[in-house]
Image (spheres, grey):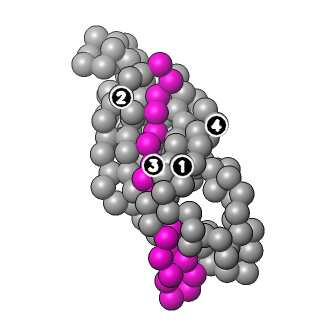
Amino acid sequence: MQTTYGELAGLTGTELGPGDWVEVTQERIALFAEATEDPQWIHLDAERAASGLFGATIAHGYLTLSLLPRLMRGLLEVEGVAMVVNAGSDKVRFLTPVRSGSRVRATAVVAAVTPAARGTRVESDVTVEIEGEEKPALVARAIALHVPA
């Protein structure tokens, strides 16, 4: 959806998406494990994970969460902003593991738009779905500060 900075206040309740599918490859999982120093076998050992609880290696929950900026790209494009700053997430819940090779995408609903000292705060209730799965990978409230140009 495209809008302008001046129109942000009227977006509460607006549904956004779905966004593009993004593949969560084993390489991406391994790079995240290296970056976060979390080499747990459920993420990296395909042979052991095949006989484990999930039947395959899975992405770290925080990897899926860290993909939100990519997954939300294009869901809300705002003209008249100098930048959009990630201000955090609330109410994050990991509901279904993302198996290596799965594709995920996001949808969102604008939950709140409020003035802030340096711009406008936009809170969106985001759902990350996994292709072919009934339950989502995660739900979270993403918070972004839109700073006017």
Disc 2 secondary structure class: loop
Residue located at (55% from left, 77% from top)? 120
Of the two numbered discs 4 and 3 on the same chain, state the one appearing first in sequence: 4
Residue type, numbered disc 4: Asp
Q: Quadrant of the C terminus?
A: bottom right
Say if the magenta span includes residue 88.
no
Residue located at (57% from left, 81% from top)? 119
Of the two numbered discs 3 and 1 on the same chain, state the one appearing first in sequence: 1
Q: Which residue is mark 2?
A: 135
Range of the magenta residues? 113-132
Magenta region, main secondary structure: strand
Q: Which residue is mark 3?
A: 126
Counting from the top left corner in percent of width and height, residue 129 is at 46, 33
Of the two numbered discs 2 and 4 on the same chain, state the one appearing first in sequence: 4
Residue located at (56% from left, 63% from top)? 11
Residue type, numbered disc 1: Glu
Residue 149 visible in the displayed image: yes
